[in-house]
Image (spheres, rainbow, N blue to C red):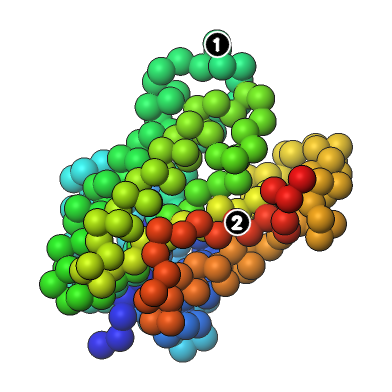
Amino acid sequence: MGRVALVTGSSRGLGSAIARRLARDGFSVAVNSASDTALAEAVVSGIRASGAAAAAFTADVTDEGEVEGLVGAVTKDLGPIDVLVLNATGPQPEAALLQVEWEEHASQLDFFVKSPVLLGRAVIPGMKARGWGRIVQIDSEIADQPPPGRSAYATAKSAQIGLTRSWARELAPLGITVNSVAPGFIPVERHADVGEEIRRHYVETVPTGRFGTPEEVAHAVSFFASDEAGFVTGQRLAVNGGRGLG
């Protein structure tokens, strides 16, 4: 049996592109959704049609009991998890900081800190026993360039980066690498209502003069998940067309 990758939040958007890319790389892929079973099954069907192995798993990755059930089900159906891609996200509040309640901060931390901790505790022992593992966090360029109104999201993403670096240091001697990919603005379904003016302004600030694609983000994840990336850990790769260059 080949290696297994679990991609959280992979029924749509960036997650589905990452799932398809890892399947193309030869992994058996666990496609996860919190509730949309039909979309997850559609991603699985597409992967299987290409000749790769995949299965859909419904679970809320911010809930400890559901995480335990998810990891158990993936292990039973596909095998032990070798690659963990932490992509799941939820609603992202946009409001002036004095209007953002603590509960909204906590909700963001649930996705970007609590969920990785729960999943890490469930899969790292197996990776440790096998002496091989890849953990890839999907963070965001917003941690570096936080726009007004995104304080809860930017704060949680910054915490996620700290988690990645601390895990990388501790897990390196065990053969487990931990890295993160920081996408810029990648048009997907949830950006459908973003206005044309905002889109135009963003493109004007990107040296490459265009938006990125989900497949370009997936390519970065593919590298971090590979055998060839075994000497790369604690790193953060921005996939944003050079927007941070000024």
The spot of residue 242 in percent (x, y) is: 72, 56
* Quadrant containing the C terminus in the rendered view: top right
The spot of residue 52 in percent (x, y) is: 43, 84
Residue 201 visible here = yes
Badge 1 marks a residue whose secondary structure is helix
* Quadrant containing the N terminus in the rendered view: bottom left
Which residue matches tag 1? 98
The disc at residue 238 is: 2
The disc at residue 236 is: none
Tell me where residue 110 sits by quadrant.
top left
Q: Nearer the viewer, residue 208 or 118?
A: 208
The spot of residue 154 in percent (x, y) is: 53, 34
Q: Earlier in the sequence, mark 2 or mark 1?
A: 1
Badge 2 marks a residue whose secondary structure is strand
Q: Is residue 121 left or right of residue 235?
A: left
Q: Residue at x 21, y 69 (%)?
A: 174
